[in-house]
Image (cartoon, grey):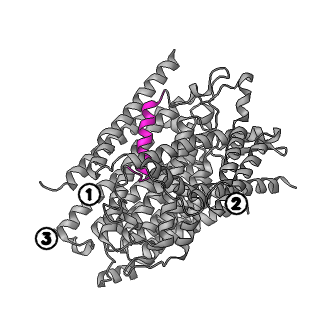
Amino acid sequence: MPLASYAVVLSAILFGLGALGFVFKRNIITIFMSIELMLNAVNLSFVAFSRMRHLLEGQVFVFFVIVVASAEAAVGMAIIMQVARNRQSLNIERIDLLKL
Amino acid sequence: MSDFTVWLIIAVAKVIVVMVVLLTVVAYLSWFERKIVAHIQSRWGPERVGPHGLIQPLADGAKFLFKEDPTPEGVDRFVYFFAPFLALSLAMTTIAVMPLGPQVRIFGHDIWLSVVESDLSLLVVFAITALSVYGVALAGWASNNKYSLLGGLRSTAQMLSYELSLTMSVVGIVLMTNPNTLSLRGIVEAQRGTATLPGASHWFVFPQILGFVCFFISAVAETNRSPFDLAEGEQELVGGFHTEYASFKFAMFFMAEYAAMVTASFMISVLFFGGYLSPFPETQAFHWTFYLPAAMALIGGVLLVPHGLRYHTALGRVLLPVMGLALIGVGIVCALSGVIGIIQGPFWLAAKVFVVLFIYVWLRSTLPRIRYDQLMAFGWKFLLPVSLANVVATSLLVALRMNR
Amino acid sequence: MTVELILFLLLAVVAVGGAINLIAQTHPIHSALSLIVVMVALAGIYLLLGAELLAMVQIIVYAGAIMVLFVFIIMLLNAGKEERTAISRAATYLGVPCGVLLTAVLGWRMAMSQPGPLAPGADTEGMSRELSTLLFTRYVFPFELTSILILVAILGVVVLAKREM
C-alpha cells in the first residue's frame, strides 16, 4: 500500500515542522498552533497505519484525539486570554517569569 | 468514444448547467426580493429598468463592475482580497452535492442528476457551512476598522452558535431513514413511501416538525438574514463586516449571501419536503401531474404575450412577448415524451425551493430585527436544548418502533 | 503514476507548504490561515486513505470550529507582528538544524518501518458505518468519558474567562 507509507513520511515531516515552530516562535498563539500541527501530523500517521493494517481502531483513536485537542484548545485559549490581560503582551519572553 | 470521454463530457455538462442556473438564480433573487418586499410594503419596487424591472440585476452588475474600487489604507492586503473570494466560492460549492433528480436515461446513458454523488453529502454541506464562517470573520478583521471588526466578530459568534442547533436538528432526520444513510439522495429516497398514498404524507416534515422549526430558524440565523441580520443591518454597525468593501467585492459578499440562502432552501426542501419527489401519489390515476411543468409554462407564456404587447414602454413591448413565446416553447418541449420523465424531479425541487425562498423574503419584510443578546440567548438557551430534546425523542420512538 | 498518487502529491505539497508558511509568517493571523490550509489538505488525504467520516469530522470540527476559535482570539486580543529579539535569533540558528535532524530521523525510521500483520477485516465499503458501530459498541466508554471531558472543559473556560463582577 504505497500511498499509506508516503502518508507516514508526510506525517513525520509535518511533525518536525510543528516541533520547529514550537521551539522558535515567540508568540503564544503561534506556539499553540504548532502544537495543533503536531497533533494533526499524529492523526495522519494513525489513519495511514490503520489503512496499512486494515484495522479501524486507528480511526477511532483519531476521533478521540480530535475531541481532546478541541477541549485543550478551548481551555488554552481561555488561559491565554487571562495571561494577555495580565501581562499586556503575547510574547513568551515576557511571560516566562512569575514576577511581573 | 471511450468510457472516460463520455464521463468527462457528462460531468462538464452538469457543471456548466448547474453553474449557469445558480448564477442566474442568485442574480434574479435580488430582483425577486426587492419586488416582494416592495409589494408587501405597498409600493412597486424596481419598475423602470426594463419591463417590470427585469433588467435591474444586469444594471446592478454593470454598476458594480464600473464603480471605483478603493482599498482603504492599512488593511492586510492578502486577507482583504481573499475574504470575499472565499465567501463566494464556498457559498457556490454546496450545490454540487445536492440531488437534483433521480437517475435518468438521456441518449442511452444512465445519469444521476447531481454534480457529485457522495455517501456523506449531508456532512459535506455542513463542512462547507462551517468553513464559510471564515469569509465573514476575515472580512471584518482585514478592514482596519473598529466597527467592521465588531460586526465581523458578532457575526462569527452568531454563525457558530446557530451551527450547533442546525446540525442537531438533522440528526432526527438521519435516524428516520431506514438503512440510515448520511447522503442527501438517500434521505430523499427514504421519503418516497408507497405508491398509493400521496407522496406528501411520507415527507419528513410531519414526523419531524420540531426539527423542521429548529432547522429553519437556525438556517435563517446562519445565513445572516433578517430577522437575525444585526451584524450587517444599516442602522446598526454601518455595514458591519462589509463596510469597507466597495463595488465588486461588495457584490461578491452580496452574491455569497444569496447563494447561501439558495443552499439553505435546497437543504430544507431535500431534508424535510421530499426533494425531487412529487407530492401526488405515483398511481396511474395521477399520471396527469406529469404534465404540470408543461402546463404551467404554457399558461405563463400565453398570459405573458398579450400583457407584453400592451406594455407601456417600447422595450417591454418587444421583450415581454419574446419571453412569453420562449415560455410557450419551453412548455411544448416539457410535454414531449423524451423530456417529460427527466423534467419531473428538477421541477418539483425547483417549486419547493421557490416556496422556501419566498418564505425567507416574507420573513425579511415582516419581522423586526432581533437584538444581539436576545439572539445569542435564543440560540444557546432555547434552540439548542430543543434540538437535543428532538434527538432524544426521535431516537426513543425509532428504537421503540424497531423493537416492535 | 495513478491519479491517487498525483492527488496525494498535490495535497502533500500544499500541506507542507502550509506548515512552512505557518512557521515563516510573522503575523499570527497568517499562521492561522496557513494552519487551516494544512488541515483541509489533510482532510483530502484522509479521503484518499479511505477515512471519509474522519475527513468530514476534521473539516467540521478542526478546521471549522477550533481554528475559528483561534482566529477569534487573535482578532480579539489584537495580536500584532512578532518581534525579533536576541533570544529568538539564537533559538533560530540553533533550533533549525536540530528540527531538521529530528524530522530526518523520524521520517527515515517511519519509512523503514514494516507494518504489522494485516488484521483480518473488511476493507473500504461502508467504512463510516463500521467506524460508528465501533465507536458506539466497543469504545462507548471512552466516548462517554470524552463527553465528560468536554463538559469539564466548558466549565473551566467559563470560570477562567469571565470577568469579576
Residue at mark 1: A78
- Which residues lie in the magenta part? B207-226
Q: Residue B219 in magenta? A: yes
Q: In the picture shown, does residue A15 fall above or below B383?
A: below
Tell which subunit mark 2 falls on: B
Task: Same chain for labels 1 and 2? Say yes or no.
Answer: no
Q: For residue C67, which quarter of the picture? A: bottom left
Q: Is residue C96 left or right of residue C44?
A: left
**Front label number (3 vs 1):** 1
For disc 2, the neighbor class at 10 Å (few under 14, some 14 to 19, many from 20) is: some
Tell which subunit mark 3 falls on: A
Depth check: give the residue in front, B377 or C14.
B377
Residue at mark 3: A99
Q: In the picture shown, does residue B62 fall above or below B271?
A: below
| Residue at the image point whose x is 53% and y is 72% from the top | B63
Q: Residue B337 in magenta? A: no
**Front label number (2 vs 3):** 2
For disc 3, the neighbor class at 10 Å (few under 14, some 14 to 19, many from 20) is: few
Amino acid carrying mark 3 in the image: Lys
Of all residues, the one furthest to the right in this rendering is: B1
| Residue at the image point whose x is 45% and y is 45% from the top | B362
Residue B359 appears at what percent x and percent y?
Answer: 48, 43
- The answer to whether residue C139 is seen in the rendering is no
- The answer to whether residue B309 is seen in the rendering is yes
Q: CA distance from mark 3 to mark 1?
A: 21 Å
Q: CA distance from mark 2 to mark 3?
A: 82 Å
Q: Secondary structure at mark 1?
A: helix
Q: Earlier in the sequence, mark 3 or mark 1?
A: 1
Residue B218 appears at what percent x and percent y?
Answer: 41, 44
Residue C39 appears at what percent x and percent y?
Answer: 49, 60
